[in-house]
Each structure stands twice: as structure tokens, then as C-alpha cells.
Image (cartoon, coloured by chain):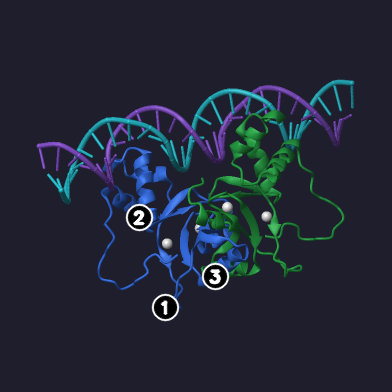
Chain colours: A blue, B green, C purple, D cyan
Amino acid sequence: MTRDAAPHLPDRPEPALTRNQALVLATLEAAATPLGAYAVLDRLRDDGLKAPAQIYRALSALQDKGLVHRLECLNAFVACRHVHDPAEDGAPPGPAVFVICDHCSATRELTDPVIGGQIERLARNQGFGLHTSSIEVRGLCAACSRATQNDPGTT
Amino acid sequence: MTRDAAPHLPDRPEPALTRNQALVLATLEAAATPLGAYAVLDRLRDDGLKAPAQIYRALSALQDKGLVHRLECLNAFVACRHVHDPAEDGAPPGPAVFVICDHCSATRELTDPVIGGQIERLARNQGFGLHTSSIEVRGLCAACSRATQNDPGTT
DNA sequence: CGCCGAACGTTATATTATAACATTGCGCTT
DNA sequence: AAGCGCAATGTTATAATATAACGTTCGGCG
Ligand SMILES: [Zn+2]
Ligand SMILES: [Zn+2]
Ligand SMILES: [Zn+2]
Ligand SMILES: [Zn+2]
């Protein structure tokens, strides 16, 4: 939930990324939409990456470091880009809420503390010890909502 | 979101399940945990089902009818079993929240209207036209929480 | 130097899902 | 009854996603 507890510590205990991890992360950061593992692989052939296992290993490490999320409903991956609510200070942001356009695949990562609290409450009512939660919302982004009203034929 | 708008209409416009759909649904209802498509297939070999496509077709139809959900984080399927909050009358129950035990795979389908409203608000703030949402929470169920405290070795 | 462990490279295989097409069965029209 | 249409089905093949298994490279370090 909290990726980095102390926001202003100068030291960096993070052991820096390996070459493959850096390549994969850069690829995801450069992408306009979530990418499948094989799409990442395709974009890294020129850099010497050749096998799925290399990509999946890097993705796995990046997920452990909190730098990449997996979108379960797409079998795809995105670089972490929290969009914090403007009216927020140091409060825990709550779990990531991914909002995914079914038309153009544009994806935003949002957070909302209320949702996190509510889910926690709901789970605890069942005696459930919550570990991670994935919230993925599908629909149409603002641009595509407008577009499909006028032109219902573009894939 | 609302599976059946009119709760007390006597007529049943629902065209009844086909044989394969009924078999698949019964399999999921009988299962203690979510099942992958191939696990369903294995359990229906004796009933003459032999190919993945048959299972996926039935699952797809059942999902359209709202009788089955797909758990994205497990690539697995469950029969719909809403657990309504006791303090609820006819209010819309909100989206399903799946609570999944990482240890025993037991899964419960809960609902909470607050979460639905909050997600809708969050999405609308982005100009996003919400269509469906999937909320999946992982952790330890009550039984497994107790068990793993005493016996941290059982898989 | 020689060892160890982490990251890497490579090959093979497992798991999940869909494409494509022929066949069956049943209601409806003629 | 014969013929048609259409949905569900059966069947085969293949795509897409993910992991297993094993050997190699490369530093740090005793
Ligand atoms: Zn994030
Ligand atoms: Zn869009
Ligand atoms: Zn349900
Ligand atoms: Zn459990």
C-alpha cells in the first residue's frame, strides 16, 4: 500500500536496477498503453533480449520493487504512475485504482483512500487478513467517449 | 451492475441454459474454489465435453447472463454468489468484491455500495465513462490466518 | 586463486485462450 | 414433408501468455 514509508530520507537503500530491469522499465514508461510481456520483448530485441523468461524475470523484480504493476484484466504491465488526488498531503493514498479505456487502451493509475478503507473494513468483517488488492475499472476515456458518439466505427 | 432490473416480474425472459452451460455452471457451483477452464473441462470429460472451446463458450454465455464471474487475478471462474450486507434492502448492491485466500483459494463474493459509488466518482472526475469494474482482494481467510500462525508449513 | 551467489542466457514446455470450420438439431416457411 | 435459417455443438488446430530447468557469466570476497 505504502510504497516508500519515509518520503524524505536522503539515503537510497534500493540496489539500483539491473540492465534488463532498466530496459523493461524504460519500455513501459515510454509506452502509451499497457504492454504485454511479449510486446515488451518485441521492443527490446535490438537490445539483445531474446527470450520471454528474461522479460518475465525483470517484470517480476520490478513488481517487487513497486515500480511496475500488472493489469490482471489485460495480462499486461504498466510503469507505476500514481496520480494523487490534489487535496492530499501525506495521508496514505490507498490502493491503486486502474482506469482502462476499452477503446484506446489508455490507462490511468489513480488512488483514493476511501476505497482502501472501505475494502479493508469489508474484508475484516469476514475475518479476512488483507494482503493486496487489485481494482481495475473499464470503460471509455473522455476522448473516446466523445469520439464514439460521433463516429461509431473506428477500431 | 444490476443483474435483473425488475425483481418481481413473473415472466422469465431468460432462455434457460443450454446443456453445456448447465453442466459448466453446476461444476462451478459444486466447486469449493474458483476453477480454471481446463479444470472445469477435466470434470466434465465423463459428460462428453472434450475441447476447451466448449468450456470457454459456455463460460462466456454464463458470464453474459451474470451467472458466472471471471477472477482476473487467477484466470479462473466462479459461480455468482452475492453475499449481501445484512443491513440492505433494495438498494443497488454495488460491484462485486472478491476476497480470495492465497492459502486455500477459498473465495467469497461480497458487495458494498460505498465502494461502487466511490469508484464511480473517481472515474467521473477523470471524464471516464465507467462500464465494468473488477475488484479482487487477496490475503488469508479467517481459517488460514489461524492455521498459519500455529503451523507455518502446510501447503 | 577459488568459491559463492545473483543475474543472465537459452531451450523446452506448461497453461490459458481463441480461430476456423464442419455438423447437428430444431423451429419455421413454403 | 421438404427446405431453410440459425443457434448450439463438436472438432482440430493454433495463438498468446507464462514458467521450468539448466548451464554460463561475472563480481565480491575469503
Ligand atoms: Zn503504482
Ligand atoms: Zn480511450
Ligand atoms: Zn455476482
Ligand atoms: Zn484460506
Which of pointers 2 and 3 indicates the residue nearer the eye? 3
Give whichever of D14, A126 is nearer the camera.
Answer: A126
The residue singled out by tag 2 in the image is A30
Question: Residue A33: percent from the left, percent from the top?
Answer: 43, 54
Among the 4 quarters of the image, the one containing residue B27 = top right
Marks 1 and 3 share the same chain: yes
Q: Is residue B108 left or right of residue A95?
A: right
Q: Disc 2 sits on a residue from what chain?
A: A
Q: Earlier in the sequence, mark 1 or mark 3?
A: 1
> Can you identify the residue that label 1 sits on?
A89
CA gap between label 1 and label 3 equals 17 Å
Query: Residue A121 at what x, y percent from top left?
Result: 58, 68
- The residue positioned 34% from the left and 48% from the top of the image is A58
SS label for mark 2? helix
**Which amino acid lies under the numbered mark 2 shown in the image of this protein?**
Ala
Residues at discs 2 and 1 in contact (Cβ within 8 Å): no
Answer yes or no: is residue A31 visible: no
Q: Check disc 3 and report the residue beneath it.
A: A117
Q: Give the amino acid at mark 3.
A: Gly
| Residue A90 quadrant | bottom left
As helix, strand or loop, the secondary structure at mark 1 comes to: loop
Q: Quadrant of residue A92?
A: bottom left
Proximity of marks 2 and 3: CB atoms separated by less than 8 Å: no
Between marks 2 and 3, how big is the CA–CA gap?
33 Å
Chain letter of disc 1 in the image: A
Q: Residue at x 36, y 43 (%)?
A: A41
Residue occupying the point 31% across, 50% down: A21
